[in-house]
Image: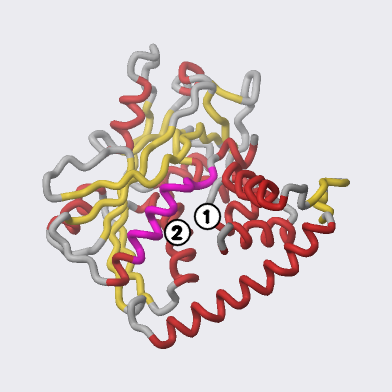
Amino acid sequence: MNIETLKVFKDLIETQSFTKTARMNYISQSAVSQQIKKLEMIFKTKLFIKRNDRFELTRVGKLLYEGAGDIIKTYDNTISRIRENFEDSKGEIKISSIYTVGIYLLNNYIRGFLSKYPNTKINLDYYEWDEVINKVLNDDCDFGFVACKKVNDINISSLHINDEEMVFVAPNSYQKPKGEKIDFIEAFKVSLIFFEKNTPSRKFVECVTKGKKVSFNVTMEMNNIETIKAAIMSNAGYSILPYTSVENDYKNGKLKIFRFSEPFYRPVYMVYNKRKKFSPPLSLFMNFMLNIKKNKTISYEEVYG
């Protein structure tokens, strides 16, 4: 049993939600379930019972919840005192990222990191895929974040940190013929708005759909995801985008989203120069991202079933 496990248990009881607890702790819902089961194995009893969509604590659960609060508070106070007296977390981390990863995925990671190491300054800039790699090679940044295409360069290390589900994105006026999911053939019959040719995102979708007997009906090409979403909202066409980039628009009723009958995911990589000597803040960030990779993040399927 460790502090993280106790925090997950405490957050679950307070939020009454596996989804919210997973988001708060940057882990998957299945990881939340596993940590609760681990605690129940340690104490050889159930910690709560689900009644009327709420978690009702057992006697042991109540004692553990009260104790967990005290332990976590003591731990947080201790960590704060250590940070006040030692400089290891102080410094600046320079990050270059492609727009879609930086805005919709990486920002959540950065918030989680800064909540643990508030003395660290993070400078995040957005570039095209090739520019991110050049920034890393020229040592103009400490870490780079790209998607779809793994970097093949002897001077760069690529750490696969996540997989983002790709979904079919449609305007609110779209009436799907049948079913909740869509297949590739059906999706590619409509007028598609895609990224420009030769971009990693475009090549990735073309590669995944190769051999699936689909023909691309691309009517518009753009190099900015916000422009693509705006075009879809104005009924100009449809697209295939990572769920993280359209999550808020979907929840706010601005766009419709359909999962594919054969789900596919785009890989996300953190890249860094092999020759770079890591300062303490860089080592802390690396360890934080390794922990993200170990636990993985919440997928569309885990949130929406």
Q: Nearer the viewer, residue 16 or 234?
A: 16
x, y percent for residue 296: 47, 46
Q: In which quarter of the image is the N terminus?
A: bottom right
The residue positioned 39% from the left and 51% from the top of the image is: 101
Give the residue type that dot 2 points to.
Tyr
Q: To which residue does mark 2 refer?
A: 109
Residue under circle 1? 26
In the image: residue 67, left or right of residue 276: right
User: Going from the N terminus, do you reach mark 2 or mark 1 first?
Assistant: 1
Mark 2 touches mark 1? (CB < 8 Å): yes
Q: Which residue is drawn at 78% across and 64% down?
A: 63
x and y percentages locating residue 239 in the rendered image: 45, 34
Q: Is residue 177 above or below residue 87?
A: above
Magenta residue span: 284-298
Q: Position of residue 44 (x, y in %)?
A: 73, 48
Residue at x-position 79% and y-position 51%? 48
Numbered label tally: 2
**Front position among marks 2 and 1:** 1
Query: Splitting the image into 4 quarters, where does residue 69 fall?
Result: bottom right
- Label 1 amino acid? Tyr
Decide whether residue 287 is among the magenta residues: yes
* Distance (Cα) linking label 2 and label 1: 8 Å
Label 1: which secondary element: loop
Crowding at mark 2 (Cα within 10 Å: few <14, some 14-19, many 20+): some
Q: Indicate the quadrant containing the C terminus: top left, top right, bottom left or bottom right.
A: top right
- Nearest the viewer among 62 and 121 is 62
Name the secondary structure under disc 2. helix
Residue at point 74%, 64% (across, down)? 65
Residue 251 part of the magenta segment: no
